[in-house]
């Protein structure tokens, strides 16, 4: 990996990167194109990550995780997304949106019940925040919960839920007496169903569906955190989610940069390699600068983000910058590869489709712009 930015990684982080990179070359790269084409999630591959302790990266080792930090999580997402962004999105939905979110809010009894099987990938998790009528305006969510004896009864609908088709357990936000509250809902819970797979432009190696709650009875012990405590869980987890998505942008951009440099050296036009044409050099050099800027920003924000160390401003900025930078790098790669870029062989068309998601999922560009402006204004 050619880089001009020096970031001090610990020996543990370096070893983690090597381990993931070897796994990616051996197991992730060979299956990626087929899963993009079939629009299916490779659940077996997730279980292999579980065996390597790569699902519970941010979970303390005393509870069966790897006991590492946000930087480690960024490394894993960057390396996986270099080969298979769609699979990485399914991994993120499981490891961060469910496992990490669940862990920091759960009681010991809840951890005992759900952690072992989610850390191995045997039980797949998903998180339901977005609704058909409410996305960015998340605090206006309309799914309701009411207490009824030894259960809570949920009514409403979620949409665009990654892993909705495969998941066996769901972390769901609903309003209990108008206060956002978090519940753990198991597939098979009476009154709960998932809709069919929703077709999409990119990130096709992960699936998404609606979640439907129709008088769904959730046992009272599946309340996660306190009644009305959902916003705390949501906001804490959004930060690591945004870092994970930023890291995916970095991995995708690095892949596109590597592909365009190699192609520009191999392909000749007008008697010389493409790399000797000034206009092509501009695509390469500007893409390299964007990748380096992404790397510097993402890893410095990751070093100051954790479950007890909040960095909303930094994580919003990292995702705002990386999402668009990665899409621009993918577009530049397509231009350098010409017709070969537009066809599937070099996978640049896939990466261009996949990079676009990060400008929407986990917070749109506009949401980050609003958050950053609000936080900067509040500091005046
Ligand atoms: C592939 C994929 C996977 C996803 N996975 C999950 C998941 O696992 N779980 C989950 O809960 N959600 C998931 N989502 C949903 C995702 O987080 C939402 O799509 C996103 O938050 C935006 O919400 P929306 O689509 O409803 O757009 P809207 O909120 O309706 O926004 C539409 C447009 O209007 C803009 N806009 C909205 N409000 C304002 C405003 N006040 N000012 C300026 N502009 C505004 C937005 O920025 C956007 O450009 C996923 C989405 C996709 C596409």
Image: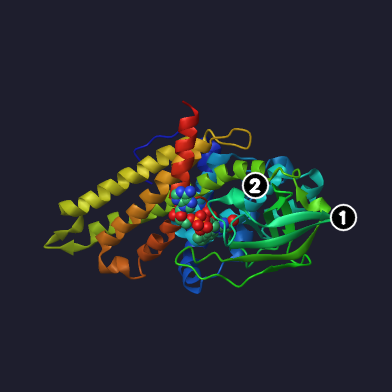
**In this rendering, the label closer to the viewer, 2 or 1:** 1
Residue that mark 2 sits on: 100
Left or right: residue 130 versus residue 278 is right
Left or right: residue 89 versus residue 255 is right
- Other residues around mark 2 within 10 Å, as few (<14) / some (14–19) / many (≥20): many
Residue 371 rendering spot, x and y as whole percentages: 49, 40
Name the quadrant containing residue 44: bottom right
> How far apart, in angstroms, are the residues tagged by discs 2 and 1?
27 Å
Q: Residue at x 48, y 36 (%)?
A: 374
> In the rendered image of this protein, does residue 153 appear above or below residue 320?
below
Towards the viewer: 94 or 28: 94
Residue that mark 1 sits on: 150
Towards the viewer: 114 or 271: 114
Residue 352 rendering spot, x and y as whole percentages: 38, 60
Q: Secondary structure at mark 2?
A: helix
Q: Mark 1 or mark 2, which is nearer the start of the sequence? A: 2
Residue 157 rendering spot, x and y as whole percentages: 65, 63
Residue 26 visible within the image: no
């Amino acid at each position: 990996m050619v880089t001009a930015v020096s970031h001090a990684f610990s020996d543990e982080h370096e070893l983690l990167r090597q381990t993931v990179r070897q796994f990616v070359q051996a197991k992730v790269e060979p299956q990626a194109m087929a899963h993009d084409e079939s629009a299916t999630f490779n659940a077996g591959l997730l279980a292999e990550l579980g065996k390597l302790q790569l699902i519970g990266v941010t979970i303390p080792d005393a509870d069966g995780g790897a006991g590492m930090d946000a930087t480690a999580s960024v490394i894993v997402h960057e390396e996986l997304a270099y080969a298979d962004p769609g699979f990485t999105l399914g991994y993120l939905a499981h490891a961060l949106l469910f496992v990490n979110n669940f862990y920091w809010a759960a009681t010991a009894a809840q951890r005992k019940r759900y952690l072992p099987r989610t850390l191995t990938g045997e039980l797949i998790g998903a998180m339901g925040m977005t609704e058909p009528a409410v996305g960015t305006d998340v605090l206006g969510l309309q799914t309701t919960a009411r207490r009824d004896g030894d259960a809570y009864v949920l009514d409403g609908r979620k949409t665009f839920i990654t892993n909705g088709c495969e998941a066996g357990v769901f972390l769901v936000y609903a309003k209990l007496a108008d206060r956002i509250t978090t519940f753990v809902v198991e597939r098979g819970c009476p009154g709960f169903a998932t809709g069919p797979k929703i077709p999409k432009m990119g990130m096709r190696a992960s699936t998404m569906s609606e979640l439907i709650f129709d008088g769904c009875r959730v046992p009272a012990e599946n309340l996660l955190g306190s009644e009305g405590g959902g916003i705390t869980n949501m906001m804490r987890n959004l930060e690591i989610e945004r870092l994970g998505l930023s890291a995916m942008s970095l991995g995708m951009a690095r892949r596109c940069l590597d592909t365009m440099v190699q192609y520009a050296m191999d392909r000749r036009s007008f008697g010389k390699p493409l790399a000797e044409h000034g206009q092509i050099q501009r695509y390469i050099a500007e893409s390299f600068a964007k990748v380096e800027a992404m790397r510097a920003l993402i890893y410095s924000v990751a070093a100051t983000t954790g479950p007890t160390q909040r960095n909303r401003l930094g994580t919003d900025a990292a995702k705002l910058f990386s999402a668009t930078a990665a899409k621009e790098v993918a577009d530049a790669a397509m231009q350098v590869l010409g017709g070969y870029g537009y066809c599937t062989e070099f996978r640049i068309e896939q990466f261009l489709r996949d990079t676009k998601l990060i400008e929407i999922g986990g917070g749109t560009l506009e949401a980050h712009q609003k958050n950053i402006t609000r936080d900067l204004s509040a500091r005046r």
